[in-house]
Amino acid sequence: MNLENAVAEVRQQFPGGHNAAIERAEQRLERFGRIAFGGFGLVMAVAVAGIVYAIIKNFIIAGDQPLVGVILALFVIFAALTLAWVVMNEDLKDKRKKRAIDIEMEVLSIVKPNTNKLLTQPAEAEFIPVTEDTTDLLTVENRTRKFEN
């Protein structure tokens, strides 16, 4: 099957400038997301530091309940680290998925099968044309069972 004409017709439906505009918009959105999440991460880091400072000042230094202060401080620190790990892990998964898609697209663009060539049969193979009622020549074993009452 020759699919080159179909590919050319599909390319006419989507001109190259359209894809470039979408790619630029995606890059801007990704850059905006990095800035937004970076700012959010900075604010969260300052908030965690403030909470830990307040816990240390009010529980540990004041000497009222030092054990409770240590436990609360560790809880806040490890909760923040867990949240950071989840965010970084999801980001890494997205990057791996994009890289796999990019590699697949690159491989597909390099390995273009030649659809102009038809499969050929060896010279000694017997060619039997398929026509109507050809299946009447096939023998079929009857595997139907009759049930007796």
Image: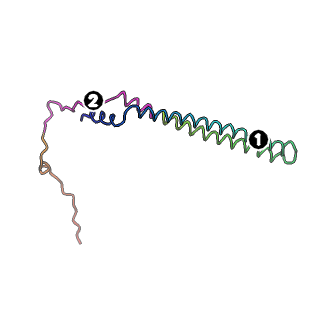
Q: Which residue is mark 1?
A: 50
Identity of the amino acid at label 2?
Asn
**Which label sits on residue 40?**
none
Query: In this picture, is 27 found above or below 58?
Result: above
Q: Nearer the viewer, mark 2 or mark 1?
A: 1
Q: Earlier in the sequence, mark 2 or mark 1?
A: 1
The region drawn magenta spans 101-127
19 falls in the magenta region: no
Label 2: few (<14), some or many (≥20) within 10 Å? few
Q: Which of the 4 image quadrants contains residue 108?
A: top left
- Image quadrant holding the C terminus, namely bottom left
- The spot of residue 26 in percent (x, y) is 50, 36
State the SS at label 1: helix
Q: Which residue is mark 2?
A: 114
Residue 135 lies left or right of residue 61; in this view the side is left
- Image quadrant holding the N terminus, namely top left
Measuring 30% from the left and 35% from the top, which residue is drawn there? 9
Measuring 39% from the left and 31% from the top, which residue is drawn there? 16
